Image (tube, rainbow, N blue to C red):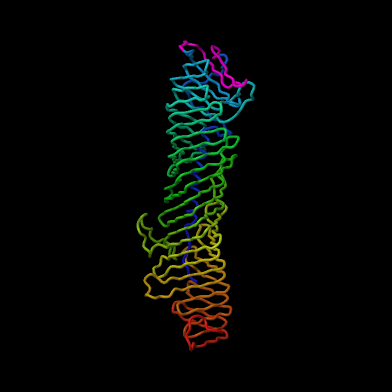
Amino acid sequence: MATAGLGQREARRKKWITGVVAAALGLTALTVGVTYWVGVTHKEQPLPLTKDLPTDIHQQLSGYTVTHSDQGRPVFTVHAARTVAFKQGGTTVLEDVMVEMYGRAGNRHDILRTQRCDYNPQSGDLFSSGNVQIVLNTPGKASPGEPPRGGQTVYLETSKVAFRNEGATAVTDAPLRFRIGPASGTARGMAYGTREGWLELKSDVTLELQPRGGADLPPPVRLQSSRLRYDKSNGQVMLWGPLEITQGTRRATAEQGVVYLDSENRVTRADLEGTVKANDSGEGRTMSLSAQRIEGDFDPVTNQLTHLLAVEGVEGSSEGKDSRAHLSGERLELHLSGAHPRPLDGDVSGAAEVRLESHPASPAGDQAPSPPAPGAAPEGSQIEKKTLTADEVKFTFRPEGRSLEEAETVGPGKLDVVPSDPNVGERVITAGQLTMAFDAKSRIEALRGLAPTHIVFQPPAHAAPGSAVQESFADRLEAKFDTATQLLGDVQQSGHFQFRDGDRQGRSDDAHYDARRQALSLTGHPVIWDSRSRMKCQRINLDLRDNTAEGSGGVQATPMQDPVAGEPDA
């Protein structure tokens, strides 16, 4: 039976899910993860500081050296070139100071450097009101006797730093700037746990990641967060909102986020939580996605996004000059591959719904006028609307990841089509399972339905009152479409086929509908009847344009003397 074209812009919606969400989440994880102790194999040039670190500590800082230990293990060492003065309370004023910190387990090598500070050798506390430079994960040895350790070096510069030996923390409320590799940024206030190796940027965190590569580089990635904390013990980077990530025309926001690192400080996963929103207004389309939570899994070796999960209140949309698309559900999952992540397959579930609006092309290939501006009511004679609903929909992409290959409902599915032609009524197709196949441009080629299948033809909106609803039933259906115009070519229904068209009804083993001729052919013990007559033969052809029927092969036509509802007894 007839239906209209399905979802010619499905691929653009799927590409956006990869392009916006995966990029926003992936850049969030990469940006935050690289900010502190992410194990990157290449080495970076250090951030230019006020003074270079001394190349020969023992020679240049031989004026004053003291080491503090915990249970016999060195925790930190204070070096100073000069002792300037002594104050009440046992405080010593030191100049040209460097503090080496080895961590609780002695497996770190961090450096704090300042020109002048007040130091209490009894408590081990230190305060510098001037410029302070902190270098985390410094190349070279950890505590005395430990082997050299590699890793990405982090550079921070701030002022008014107080180091408290009791809690093994260095704190400041002053502004600071930092850099690691291609990422640099600023914040206000810092707390650093020297023994456990945690770092907290207290407020106004801004980070910018410069892209690498050739001449055709993407815009830099910018991340803003109200607070950031890294805990080395559990390998997590916590982000507090409002959290915002931007890159060119792309933007993502969330209330908070977490980045997970493995034992080698490589990103393995990133979560964005609390009304997560992502949008992109580039390439002639406006696209958005929102959910309460979005999670991304990364290959720790390549740092590439491999899996994406959005849960709770998932809403996605895409608008261009010739189409609109909207996706909703409770759970959206994508598997991806490649340096520039390409989708392999995906799944949307939990009251899944896909709504599509488009201008079908004319048979000659002329494109219809653009849809009205966002927010304006579209005219029914111009827009074709399609809505697919199911508990769950699975989809696969072609190998290059640029176009949709197949979409399939898991269990019963429903397709509601409102044609662009006002002379054609709404069509509703339901089946125990619906499968849609697409061409390389993600235009629908075929639709397949498994038992039980049901097609409903509603009369046009301007039809006369009391116009009949047409229905057909079968075990299976297969429909083909013209990929250029997205108009229905034909429909084959088989297995216990039945139809109702007002007073007329029929049944057969198989039925073939030709949309171009608006002709329905019944084979396999076909029978049709109404309140006045009954016909049985080997084949029945119905012309739906003039509402006539013709039988061939052993025709048996019987008038109905006692009109009754339903099929008369054989």
Tell me where residue 272 appears, x and y as whole percent.
49, 43
Query: Residue at coordinates 46% horizontally, 64% vertically from top-left?
Result: 416
* 498 vs 92, nearest the viewer: 92
Q: Kindly report the secondary structure that dominates the magenta region of the rendered protein.
A: strand
Quarter residue 495 falls in: bottom right
Tell me where residue 368 appears, x and y as whole percent.
40, 61
Q: What residue span does the magenta drawing correspond to?
A: 60-88
Tell me where residue 107 appears, x and y as whole percent.
61, 26
Query: Residue at coordinates 55% horizontally, 71% vertically from top-left?
Result: 474
Most extreme residue toward the left is: 376
Q: Is residue 400 left or right of residue 4?
A: right
* 65 vs 399, nearest the viewer: 65
* 291 vs 177, nearest the viewer: 291
Query: Residue at coordinates 40% horizontally, 55% vertically from top-left?
Result: 321
Q: Is residue 547 magenta?
A: no
Is 94 rendered above or below residue 488?
above
Q: Is residue 84 magenta?
A: yes
Tell me where residue 516 appears, x and y as whole percent.
48, 72
